Amino acid sequence: MELSVIDQIKQRLEVSDPLEFFKYVKILDATTNQIVSYQMWPHLEYLIKAIYKWPLLIGLKAKQIGWSWTIAGVAVEKCSRTGANVIEISKGEDQAADLLAKSRFIEENLPKHLRHELDKDGTFLIHFKNTQSRIHTVPSTVTAGLGETASIIFPDEHEFHPYAKENWAHLKPTIDAGAQCVMGSTAEPTNIDSNFKTIWRGAREGMGNYYPIPGVNLVVNEGEVPGPNGFFPIFFGYDCRPGRDDEWYERTEKTYDLPHQFRANYPKTEEEALSPIIGRTVFDALSLQRMQSKAIKEEEIRQGAVHIFRRPQAGIQYMAGVDMAEGRGGDYSVLWIEGKDGLARELCAVIHSNRILPDIFTFMSCELLKEYFNPRVICGADAWGQMFIGDLVSHGYDKSKIYASDDKREKLGYQETAKTRDKDLLEMEKSIRGNLQIHYIPAIKEFFAFQIGDNGRMEAAEGSHDDLVMAACKCNFGFIRYKAASGGIKVTYSSTWRG
């Protein structure tokens, strides 16, 4: 029996809840090629709720977890409302057409009282007549997104878009004007500074450890809050999809000839998902992964920037490295204190902030250094470093404990050049593989993001920082090259290397 208009409206109101709407959704099973009901797995229920909660959302995910069908369903549900304008951007034309085809399939297989009349139905555009809403999907080209207005944007598999940065620049004004953005992708290990990874790091920067969502096999920022760039990040590991146990993992791994590609497609952790091809990392990824698994939590956190892992102990040799910045929200200032007991070294304390002004940072550093028995300090000799050293001395710190680049100790500070930087990074790499244990997770992630770029230089991936790495390098330099001398401290170099 044909429902009256009023009854149809009532039934539409009953499914105004998106989760209720998905109970009516049918999808095409890629394995069996059969029409099946949408499976509301726990991680997909969380995803749907998150999409309707957060204006900006980014998902770093394993493959085949139901993301694309969920996005296609959300697009249709959004268009059941008046005036929705959905923009989907995919890698190429085939992918764009395929994503829109999923939305079309969902719309065509809804119960009759939930379907809409389409007055435009093309390869890249669906227009809903009654609600005046539309879904427009486009491939990633140089001009994709230019001049577009939207209520919600779905950059699908953004990591693989050939013009991701250009598209993002075109879409950013629309997002800044209030459009919602839901971005999801697996990671590509050969693309170390992609726009997707830059946005992901911006959502994770300074957010501490992940918080696992009980019973869902997802992890988000601690406290379930957006990151500094406004995006709410969700990591979808390989096992968020039901049925993927250890046996499945081992069986699937055997079907891959390239281990790094398998880890990217089915990651266990965020670090594994973002881990590049081993041949392009400056620091050994396996050593960093082992280091992270052994990392301990802070014993104490002071003022939100001082992290204590091992309290001072008599008989331990301490060394400090410093990398200074202006403290106005850009680069970070870092004090890195390591302890050495025999051949073993570990990070004991670190100050890490980009919001502490130099004079306050120096005072905090001086107080912490005194706790650790006034260790030797290696700080760069640039303008910010010189300011730090001058203030440190004015606070009463022993000048003989501060590295000088000349025997007369008239030039306090470490003179850094391109050659010394490369050598320090290579020596740091040896220590990472050797006897050093780092507990500070943001530092381990920064080491992960240090890559050999296409230009052959060792550098932080775009969107990442190098302040923790360079402070650690100075401390490492202190343990390896610092030698005691009667006139204070002296450094030794190989006969073929000039620092």
Image (spheres, grey):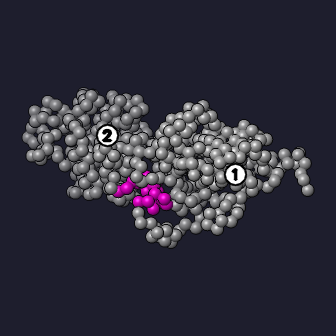
Near mark 2 (Cα within 10 A), the count class, few <14, some 14-19 or many ≥20, is many
Q: Nearer the viewer, mark 1 or mark 2?
A: 1
Point 78% across, 47% down: residue:
116
* Position in image of residue 91 (x %, y %): 53, 48
User: Would you identify the image quadrant in which residue 354 lies?
Assistant: top left
* Position in image of residue 74 (x %, y %): 67, 48
Q: Label 2 near label 1: C-beta < 8 Å? A: no
The reply to whether residue 93 is in sight is yes
Near-viewer residue (478 or 8): 8
User: Would you identify the image quadrant in which residue 293 lies?
Assistant: bottom left
Q: Which residue is mark 2?
A: 335
Point 65% across, 37% down: residue:
151
Point 27% across, 41% down: residue:
321
Q: Which residue is mark 1?
A: 104
First in sequence, mark 1 or 2: give its number: 1
Secondary structure mostly taken by the magenta-highlighted segment of the chain: helix
Near-viewer residue (26 or 463): 26
- Whether residue 265 is in magenta: the answer is yes
Q: In the rendered view, does 293 fall on the left or right side of 111? A: left
* Position in image of residue 242 (x %, y %): 59, 64
Q: Which residues are magenta?
A: 259-278
